[in-house]
Image (tube, rainbow, N blue to C red):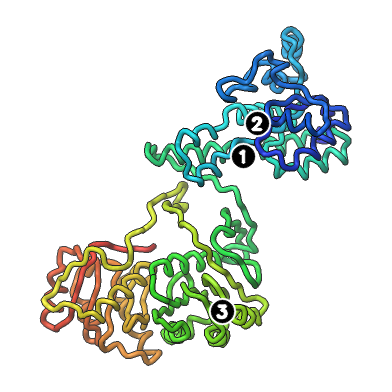
């Protein structure tokens, strides 16, 4: 049945974007298709030297209310929706002198694009399509008899069908275009709803992302995966192999982390956690110090910086194996050096806004939350101990707190002189995370004397501050808020350890 072809005899065409339309209407005209059209589309087709009739001449109603009502008429929708195998429908079609319409080519007013332009609301509202989306849905519903083209992106494929099949279409093809039409209409409605829901706050989950990329595989080779989004808005890929599922996760973590820093900074991430990070005015020095924290984990990692990578820096970076490097820019010589390995992924990050909502699948549903926009820096600082951190310690505490915000809970970060010394993350107890961090620092001969500690959540007991102090830590930053804060504070006061609170927990599960 899918191979049974129907000839296109009549078409209704009304589009906002005329690009690519001429080739379509020219081919339809060659096949003797009768064309109805409206407004600017009618003018375009007529001026192209192709026979076309006005919708107004068919309905005997002009376009009214500033173009809000043009095609909303029984003669139009009847011609699209009547069932060709239904005797009653055919009888009514004849009774009311309704023409059959076999093809609908309609696109939608650019609501989403207009929204990005920050225009006045009354101008934006006029970009909510009524007639167009109704025509698309009607034609898609009646796919058994009608073909719908709902975007100029479909023109090439449709033109190929016209040429190869001499103006005829199969049921399978009509059903395919119907699915495309409902995809476009549902995305359109979702974007409009999201605009209105910014203030109304109706508690429903609606998301629609048009761009989809098939990935090589998921977290593991036996898992299939796709990315729904447009990475072109985030970065330009300058070199390297196709980005994988895990590359995307690490890149997301890297960009979220580096956005915390205004000062020149290098970070190295592995499995979404920073294994190296340093802030210095000299970028080569920043790179060397970031690598020094854990050169073992840096192998095969993701590298990110918020400054231009120059030739000297690129030469140092190229001494190790890594998967991805991300920077706002690269000098020509630096790029040539980094391109020496064909599989290295080199990404030039663009300025873009991160989504303000995050969601993930849980059980048989989805959880949604606001992005953690509370800065990893110090906003509402509280001095918990008698001794206060000096200026150098404060800088290190802010630095460490930014890192701990982006580390898997339970998370502990040890830092000194705006350099990550070691971190412990993803452990089932905070004590284990701290012991892991201390052990890692010692394994790379990084002394902890005079270092600071950051924790992503409060200390219910004094055990962590005691272990940290005994390892050489002399300043601590934590959210505070435990019923037993006083135990940690008392220990710090007795041992000249400064402790400050942020009042903000940064769990990351």
Judged left or right of residue 160, residue 210 is: left
> Where, by quadrant of the figure, is residue 224 drawn?
bottom right
Q: Which residue is mark 1?
A: 184
Give the crowd class for mark 1: few <14, some 14-19, many >=20 residues within 10 Å. Answer: many
Q: Which quadrant of the structure image shows residue 226?
A: bottom right
Between marks 2 and 3 in the image, the one whose residue lies nearer the viewer = 2
**Residue farthest along the bottom direction in this orientation:** 445
Earlier residue among tags 1 and 3: 1
Mark 3 lies on a secondary structure that is strand
Disc 2 target residue? 136
Q: Secondary structure at mark 2?
A: helix
The residue wearing badge 3 is 322
Tally the numbered discs: 3
The Cα–Cα distance between marks 1 and 2, rounded to whole angstroms, is: 9 Å
Q: Looking at the picture, how far across and down is residue 105, in whole percent?
A: 72, 33
Dot placed on the residue nearer the N-terminal end, 2 or 3: 2
Q: Are marks 1 and 2 in contact (CB under 8 Å)?
A: yes
Q: Is residue 4 visible to us here? A: no
Instruction: Tell me if residue 20 comes above or below residue 58 in the rendering.
Output: below
The part of the image, by quadrant, that contains residue 404 is bottom left
């Amino acid at each position: 049945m899918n191979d049974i072809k129907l000839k296109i005899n009549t078409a209704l065409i009304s589009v906002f974007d005329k690009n690519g339309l001429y080739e379509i209407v020219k081919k339809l005209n060659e096949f003797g298709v009768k064309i109805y059209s409206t407004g600017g589309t009618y003018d375009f087709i007529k001026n192209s030297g192709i026979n076309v009739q006005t919708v107004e001449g068919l309905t005997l109603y002009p376009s009214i209310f500033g173009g809000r009502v043009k095609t909303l008429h029984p003669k139009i929708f009847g011609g699209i929706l009547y069932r060709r195998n239904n005797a009653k429908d055919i009888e009514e079609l004849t009774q009311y002198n309704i023409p059959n319409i076999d093809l609908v080519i309609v696109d939608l007013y650019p609501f989403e694009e207009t929204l990005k332009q920050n225009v006045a609301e009354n101008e934006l509202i006029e970009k909510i399509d009524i007639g167009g989306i109704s025509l698309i849905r009607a034609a898609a519903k009646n796919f058994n008899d009608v073909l719908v083209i709902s975007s100029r992106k479909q023109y090439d494929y449709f033109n190929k069908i016209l040429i190869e099949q001499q103006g005829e279409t199969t049921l399978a093809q009509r059903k395919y275009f119907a699915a495309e039409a409902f995809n476009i209409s549902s995305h359109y409605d979702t974007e409009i709803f999201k605009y209105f829901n910014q203030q109304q706050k109706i508690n429903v989950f609606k998301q629609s992302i048009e761009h989809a990329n098939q990935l090589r595989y998921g977290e593991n080779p036996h898992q299939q995966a796709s990315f729904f989004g447009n990475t072109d808005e985030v970065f330009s890929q300058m070199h390297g192999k196709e980005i994988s599922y895990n590359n995307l996760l690490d890149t997301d973590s890297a960009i979220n982390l580096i956005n915390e820093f205004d000062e020149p900074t290098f970070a190295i991430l592995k499995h979404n956690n920073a294994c190296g990070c340093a802030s210095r005015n000299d970028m080569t020095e920043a790179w060397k110090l970031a690598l020094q924290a854990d050169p073992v984990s840096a192998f095969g990692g993701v590298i990110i910086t918020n400054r231009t990578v120059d030739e000297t820096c690129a030469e140092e970076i190229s001494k190790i194996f890594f998967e991805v490097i991300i920077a706002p820019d690269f000098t020509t010589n630096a790029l040539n050096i980094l391109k020496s390995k064909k599989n290295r992924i080199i990404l030039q990050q663009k300025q873009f806004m991160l989504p303000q909502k995050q969601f993930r699948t849980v059980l048989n549903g989805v959880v949604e939350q606001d992005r953690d926009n509370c800065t990893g820096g110090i906003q509402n600082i509280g001095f918990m101990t008698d001794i206060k951190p000096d200026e150098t310690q404060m800088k290190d505490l802010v630095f460490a707190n930014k890192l701990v915000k982006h580390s898997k809970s339970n998370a502990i970060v040890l830092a000194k002189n705006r350099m990550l010394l070691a971190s412990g993350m993803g452990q089932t107890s905070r004590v284990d995370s701290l012991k892991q961090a201390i052990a890692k620092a010692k394994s790379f001969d990084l002394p902890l004397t005079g270092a600071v500690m950051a924790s992503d959540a409060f200390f219910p007991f004094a055990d962590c501050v005691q272990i940290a102090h005994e390892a050489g830590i002399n300043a601590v930053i934590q959210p505070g808020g435990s019923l037993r804060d006083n135990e940690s504070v008392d220990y710090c006061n007795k041992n000249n350890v400064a402790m400050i609170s942020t009042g903000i927990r940064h769990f990351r599960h």
